[in-house]
Amino acid sequence: MQNTTRQIQTDVLVIGGGATGLGTVRDLAMRGIRTVLVEKGDLTHGTTGRYHGLLHSGGRYVVKDPQSATECAEENAILRRIMPQYIEDTSGFFVITPWDDPDYGDRFLKACHDTRVPVQEISVEEALRREPVLNPKISRVFEVPDGSADSFMSAYGIARSATQYGASILNYHFVTDLVREGDRIVAAIVEDLRTGEHKRIEATYILNTAGAWAGKIAQLADLRVNVMPGKGTMIAMNHRMVNTVINRCKLPADGDILVPIHTVSVIGTTDIHVLDPDVYGIEPDEVTFLMEEGEKMIPGFTRYRALRAWAGVRPLYREESSAVSDRDVSRAYKLLDHRKRDGVDGFISIVGGKWTTYRLMAEEIVDIVAARLGVSTPCRTAQEVIPGGEESKLYWLGHNLAHVEADDSYGDLLCECELVTRKQVVQAIRGGAANLDDVRRETRLGMGPCQGGFCTYRAAALWGEVKPDAVPTNAKNNGKLAQDGAGMPGTALVRHFLQERWKGLTSIMWGDQLRQARLDQLIYVDTLGIDLLPEHIRPPQPENELVTGHPAIATEYHHD
Amino acid sequence: MTERAIVVGAGLAGLMGALALTEAGCRPLVLAKGLGITHWVGGTLDVLGTTGNQSLRVALDDLIANNPDHPYAKLGISEIEAGIARFRAVMQQAHYPYAGSLERNMILPTALGALRPTAYAPITMVAGDMRQGGELLIAGFHELRDFYPPLAAANLREQGVAVRNVYLELPPSAKRLDYSTRTFAFFFDDPDFRQAIGRQLREVRGKATRIGLPAVLGLRDPVEAVADLQRLTGAQIFEIPTLPPSIPGMRLMNIFRRTIEAAGGRVQIGSTVHRAGGNADRLTHLYSEAAAHDQEHRVAVALLATGGIAGGGIGTDYTGRVWDSALDLPLHAPAGREGWFASRFLHREGHPIFAAGVATDDQLRPLDSAGNLVYENVAVAGMALAGSDPVQERSVTGLTVTTGWHAGNLLARAMQAHLETSN
């Protein structure tokens, strides 16, 4: 059935292109181990690309999940050192609002000390001076070293570094099977979703870093890994209404955190157990709930403009399935050595954890593999800076503007909302972006208030000028995609990106953002007439296809 | 303070309504939160784009016969024609004539290379009509990030059009740190700049008989600019509308404002009407906010032309509430946010929420949900009307112009009658 046309041999195959997988593949390559990573979608297609961007101080877990709190605190300090260019030092407040138990404050403070999470109580006056829109009725404030982190840009940075060390990273490669010979997993069969070609990747070790999908991967080897995908919904608000991360000081719950990141503030999250990490949506009552919880931290919150909503699935892990709420499952990560656990060698899973602990998780899993492969080179990821961060300068909000001012590149802004220049977009296209959504992840194109209204047309046009022979045209003609695929140059890019933006808009579109959508419709339908362009004029060229709508990677459902 | 004719909104519906009131001697006051739809659309007069192979007039007759709630049905074909005729006459007087007909749409290329139907276009655009043959050249500037000749040309080629594309060099005197469509319009107002561009175009023209440029060929006298470029190149020149802010739209705004103010009307941008007062069947007061203080206006008649969701006249919030932000008139809108959108942005039917608006009687006067008249001295025009989604129908400018004109005339008559009875 499988027309296996190509064989690849490597020492270690890593499955999953999120933060953990990318951290793992870089660590392996730095230790001189041959390695290949496969990811079924774009890099960060999974949970890494769908979280609020909090660099945890550990504060959220001090009471309930002390081990995770300490891990976060230690990794927080390390990440600031090794990837400062992706991290903003926002600091974080834990505030007791009138809706929270006032006695929790003392418990929180003690637990911070016990878990070695740096903490300092500050006066309410001081907190309000620094964050004037914060609810003035708060009674106590504790400051911790929270930060915000760009999980897209850091993923690309880690991936580039890994590649420089010799790793091979294959996205749009979907694992269809794991090959077991006796008590050993020896190879994975993967499908290149762009061409339909199957490849057999043989490896001494296969590492399952697929996060919320780790259970599905393990199943291919008839192994049971009990991942409980916990869906969390978040909303980006179009203002830095705060410059400090704001947490409610209570046991972690829904809608209790506000993270300032880049030009927006993200409120999160809900936590709803889902059966399948590929099937979930954003429910209207989740949005209403988050908006109204926001009001408790920031009075007037519901009148700010909501920019976009999205949901991700947490890779929560439980050894045995039982009926408890997702909130009660530990955030700590867990390494599953299937040799010890199931008597199957050649395969190791790592599950759970946070974005903040990705490096530590990578170190732990690579330590085991390296030992088994007889490699004694020690881990250097806690010391070696990811290229671009050598000057130890943390990201700051004025970063992009400073660049534009330094280069006088006002006239080259393709995305005025996020200050993205022509040069950055050209770099991302030349660097191998598969579509405008890839360009967005590297540059923040289209992530501002207009959600691609102006820059989509510009960037798609530029693509044709930078790579005239490689403009993605059509997508695979399978059901859902039939309407999407336009055989016209540049049009597939425009349609795809507008639709990707639209997906994140419908659940939060009211007020100014609804008005914006109407303007975008006036531009693309009324003025540009995109709906008048005939579709499927040219047969698609396989290597140029947009594949992000392939059923294997099409997450989220829609209300039609 | 005397009773006045008040127009709320300065888009095409408000401006046409104000023009009708001005010409009837009613000296209207236009209060607008900001600039209207002129600056967002390409500046062609689109009456109806969904005509298929029918003539435009037949398609309009069908639409009117089959959709009694459609604003066009409330006007009827003769009022539609009257509005278009008045619009064209004003543009003609301002030396910015519109060509076209109600018989057949012309087909103009867009900045994306699509072929777009429209009934009337400024003569600076009509040479782009794709119903005629001949090789095309599409030219632009690297510095203008809102127009890309290669993309437009590539898509046109896919549709069988013989077309080449070229980027032109800016003369050294035109170097700036930043460029917008407006920067280029100022450039093209300068005959020396046109000389420099015309000479380049002549060199690269080749066999092209028609040359398309972004719609930025000047604000002061674009017709003269096109004539100049035609003399210099020996080819026909046409403008292609592109991303906002729209230069052709700014020309319309300038012409309307001059015409209305010259005849005694006033246009006040930056005044947000946010509250209304009235009695059983008449609107008596409007309140606008400008420079942080409230202004009270006594109302003889009022035209609501706030542009619907696009214009900001319809407010919405996270609970799914939908309201008229100026007069608080009852609205016709889908209930509950779940029903507002289709799953695809480019869904063929559009999105239900964008058809939200005020339901009216045949005289465009507002009705409540039970079909009762709310105010007898108020009319509604343009995108604030329920009963259609002009973007999906490709009737944005046609519908706003004709309903604005019709509503303005009806209000002028109502105002005269009111003044006679109150004297």
Image (spheres, coloured by chain):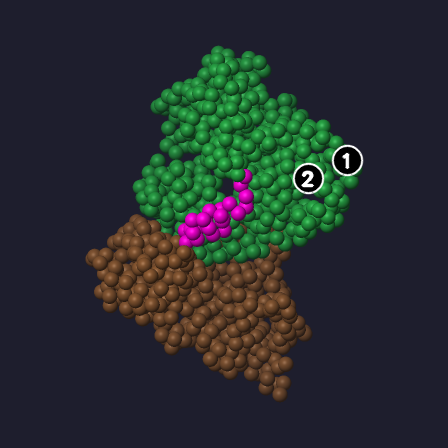
Chain colours: A green, B brown
Percent position of residue A337, x then y: 56, 17
- Most foreground residue, A526 or B202: B202
Left or right, B234 with reference to A529: left
Q: Which residue is drawn at 51% across and 24% down?
A: A380
Q: Which residue is drawn at 66% across and 30% down?
A: A69
Q: Residue at x 67, y 32 (%)?
A: A117
- Most foreground residue, B231 or A275: B231
Q: Are circles 2 and 1 on residues that touch, CB within 8 Å?
A: no
Q: Can residue A21 be seen in this view?
A: no
**Which chain contains the residue that carries disc 1?**
A
Q: Does the magenta stretch include residue A498?
A: no
Percent position of residue B320, x then y: 62, 54
Percent position of residue A329, x then y: 66, 29
Q: How crowded is mark 2: few (under 14 residues within 10 Å), some or many (20 or more)?
A: many
The amino acid marked with disc number 2 is Glu
**Which chain contains the residue that carries disc 2?**
A
Q: What element carries label 1?
A: helix
Quarter-wise, where is residue A267 in the image?
Answer: top right
In this picture, which residue range is highlighted in magenta? A394-418
Q: Residue at x 49, y 57 (%)?
A: A519
Quarter-wise, where is residue B127 in the image?
Answer: bottom left
The correct choice, above or below, for A97 with respect to B199 in the image is above
Sooner in the amino-acid sequence: mark 2 or mark 1? 1
Quadrant, the N terminus of chain A: top left
Residue that mark 1 sits on = A106
The correct choice, above or below, for A461 with respect to A109 in the image is below
Label annotation for residue B359 = none
The amino acid marked with disc number 1 is Asp
- Between the C-alphas of marks 2 and 1, the distance is 14 Å
Residue that mark 2 sits on = A143
